[in-house]
Amino acid sequence: MVEVQLIIDLVEPGKGRRRAERITMLPGVPAAGDHVHVAKLLALKVGGVSWMVRESSVMVFLTRADSNPESVVDHDGELELAQHWIDALKEAGWNIGEFD
């Protein structure tokens, strides 16, 4: 098992940007294009992986998967999520930051 920091860059038109983060254990480091379940009934695609050698950490940036419903909208790598998905992330233990 590998500890990874999952990151979703969120955007809400008219309000701004914020970040959702969660540290979790995965069976291995996912590769770009892999899917990661982030909340009940929601999986997102790995858009990129960043290894921080000094800190021995792995950051996994998530983006919209082709199979996501219309309530998940991609804005150049930032996701606009319907409120029920934000609530599902919170219930799954995600830390949702404040708007910029």
Image (cartoon, rainbow, N blue to C red):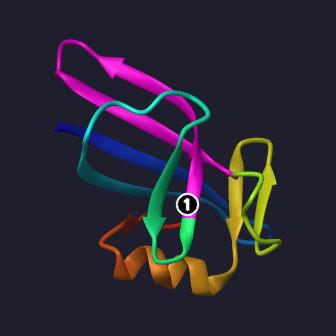
Residue in view at x 77 percent, y 75 percent: 71
Residue 45, percent from left and from top: 60, 46
Q: Circle 1 sits on which residue?
A: 43
Is 55 in front, or is 37?
A: 37
Residue 84, percent from left and from top: 60, 87
Residue 3, percent from left and from top: 20, 39
Tell me if residue 83 comes above or below residue 78 in the rendering. Answer: below
Residue 30 painted magenta: no
Tell me if residue 2 comes above or below residue 70 in the rendering. Answer: above
Q: Which residues are the magenta region?
A: 43-64
**What secondary structure is marked by label 1?**
strand
Residue in view at x 54 percent, y 76 percent: 41
Tell whether 44 sits left or right of 23.
right
Residue 90, percent from left and from top: 39, 78
Q: Give the overall secondary structure of the magenta segment.
A: strand
**Residue type beneath disc 1:** Ala
Residue in view at x 34 percent, y 19 percent: 51
Location of residue 52 by image quarter: top left
